[in-house]
Image (cartoon, rainbow, N blue to C red):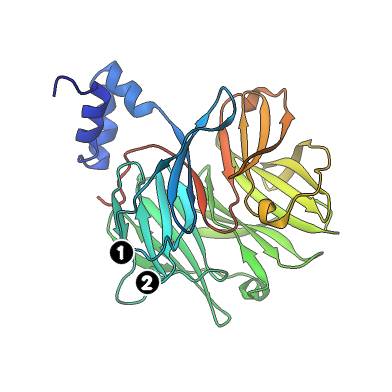
Amino acid sequence: MADLPVHTIVFEILTRVPAKDVGRSKSVCKQWYALLSTQDFRVLLIDDLTCSVHPIIFQSNDYGPSSIVTFPFHHQNNDVSILSHLNGLLCVCLNHTYELLLWNPTTTAFKHLSTPDSHGFYINTLDAIGLYVDADYDYKVLHIKRRSGVLGVYVYSREVDSWRNIPFITRQEYLSPHFNWSAGTFCGGTLYFTVCECWIGGTNVVICFDVNSEQFKEISFPPVPSTGMVQGVLVNVKNELHMFASTGMFEMTIDLWTLQGDYWIKVLSCPPIPSISLSLWCDITHYVTNGNWFVMTKLGKLFTIEMDMKPFECFYPVTWFRGFKGAVFVETIVSPSI
């Protein structure tokens, strides 16, 4: 026991302690505070044969050597889709059964969210998921379901371990499968979803969900050209919502926007991007750190944009991974259940 590193012993203890007590443990001593406050970013990637985790190397702004992750739950041929992530927790779907789970890849703990009364079952292309924490520090899952032109919205509470229905009235056309709903991005007490029509020149909006009042509203998309493909990827930067908005056809342009009130302000634009294959484009992930903006895929960096802006001195990841086969997550010991 004396040969084990202190942080390993503490980590093994705290993964078995209720989440509320873990927060209080920061006050034990400076060493524990530093351990529990450290955020190590990892990229988790799933393919047909393996599930692997790659550390982010800040010095080279690239992926480090991978380590294989074993799923702690039953699956078939890695048929696991990553739908949302927050504070080290991933909300995933088992594609062969449509079941939803909460999973912490760091501690390997997981929680089934599906119930006998048909809650917690996810259908790709029709549903949307968002993870958030409310004012009472209860981790919750928002599940938006579209079934035969009818929209249902359900909230799962980790605290009470149950689902409940909440009202949501929106435009009828958004219930159509022609509209693609993104995963929710949690920022400043609100979950944000992009809702984009699946053809060139279609309608694009942002749906906002206040996690404490449980009220919805709609705001406009940034004023980007609609003459080509449009893709908006949201990220929380220091509790301010930003969007990487991509437009174009054979050459893509990416603009970075920030939300102020209900209106979007352009932060910067990057030069037109050389042609990128569709398979790579659907895998793009953005990282902002040390004054640089990196556009990467699971194969590595595509290009770098230099930024001289103080608000972006830290590291902020935003994932697209249209195939639901990847996520950037922070190593934490947040538990999927109480």
Residue drawn at x 69%, y 62% is 196
Residue type at the position of mark 2: His
The answer to whether mark 1 and mark 2 are in CB contact below 8 A is no
Q: Quadrant of residue 286?
A: top right
Does residue 204 appear to the left or right of 186 in the view shown? right
Tell me the residue at 64%/49% (across/down): 233
Left or right: 244, with 14 as reference point: right
Label 2: how many Cα within 10 Å (few below 14, some 14–19, many 20+): some
> For residue 202, what is the image quadrant?
bottom right
The spot of residue 108 in percent (x, y) is 30, 47
Please name whichever residue, 333 or 155, is drawn nearer the observer in this view of the structure. 333
Numbered tag placed on residue 119 in the rendering: 2
SS at mark 2 in the image: loop
Precedes in sequence: disc 1 or disc 2: 2
Which residue lies at the image location 18% right of the left edge and 20% below the top edge? 3
**Is residue 163 at least partly visible in the picture?**
yes
Look at mark 1 in the image and give the residue it sits on.
162
- Name of the residue lying farthest toward the bottom: 148
Q: Amino acid at mark 1?
A: Ser
Q: How many marks?
A: 2
Estimate the spatial distance between the alpha carbons at disc 1 and disc 2, rounded to whole Å.
Answer: 9 Å
Q: Residue furthest front?
A: 49
Q: Is residue 134 visible?
A: no
**Residue 203: x, y in percent?**
75, 64
